[in-house]
């Protein structure tokens, strides 16, 4: 996947993954959201001003991991 077009596109992909009820589409949505989150993490500078967003991104990754386990999306 290419880099997100905006700094917050990962949030849209994350929300779609969390709300998807179809397991086949859910797996794809989770993968896209994880890729977008990782892309955003690489875009962020290592400054104190980005720590809040970094924490938000890591939290989202944690929830996506739980979602994979709960919905058996591996």
Image (cartoon, rainbow, N blue to C red):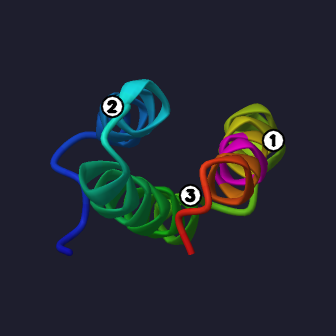
Side of 7 where 56 appears, left or right: right
Side of 61 where 40 appears, left or right: left
Q: Residues within 10 Å of mark 2 (few under 14, many from 20)?
A: some
Q: Secondary structure at mark 1?
A: helix
Q: Residue at x 78, y 32 (%)?
A: 52
Residue under numbered circle 2 = 16
Q: Secondary structure at mark 2?
A: helix
Q: Which secondary structure type mostly characterizes the magenta part of the structure?
A: helix
Considering only vertical position in the picture, is 31 above or below 21?
below
Q: Earlier in the sequence, mark 1 or mark 3?
A: 3
Q: Quadrant of residue 57?
A: top right
Q: Residue at x 40, y 66 (%)?
A: 31
The span from disc 2 to disc 1 (Cα, nearest Å) is 20 Å
Q: Residues within 10 Å of mark 3 (few under 14, many from 20)?
A: some
Side of 74 where 20 appears, left or right: left
The span from disc 1 to disc 3 (Cα, nearest Å) is 12 Å
Task: Please tell me which residue lies in front, 1 or 18.
Answer: 18
Considering only vertical position in the picture, is 49 above or below 54?
above
What numbered label is drawn on residue 55? 1
Percent of width and height locating residue 72: 61, 61
The span from disc 3 to disc 2 (Cα, nearest Å) is 23 Å
Q: In the rendered image, which quarter contains the C terminus?
A: bottom right
Q: Earlier in the sequence, mark 2 or mark 1?
A: 2
Contact between labelled residues 2 and 3, with CB atoms less than 8 Å apart: no
């Amino acid at each position: 996947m290419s880099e997100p077009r905006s700094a917050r596109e990962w949030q849209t992909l994350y929300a779609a993954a969390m709300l998807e009820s179809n397991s086949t589409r859910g797996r794809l949505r989770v993968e896209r959201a994880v890729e977008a989150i990782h892309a955003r993490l690489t875009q962020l500078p290592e400054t104190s001003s980005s720590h809040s967003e970094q924490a938000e991104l890591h939290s989202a990754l944690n929830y996506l991991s739980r979602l994979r386990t709960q919905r058996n999306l591996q």
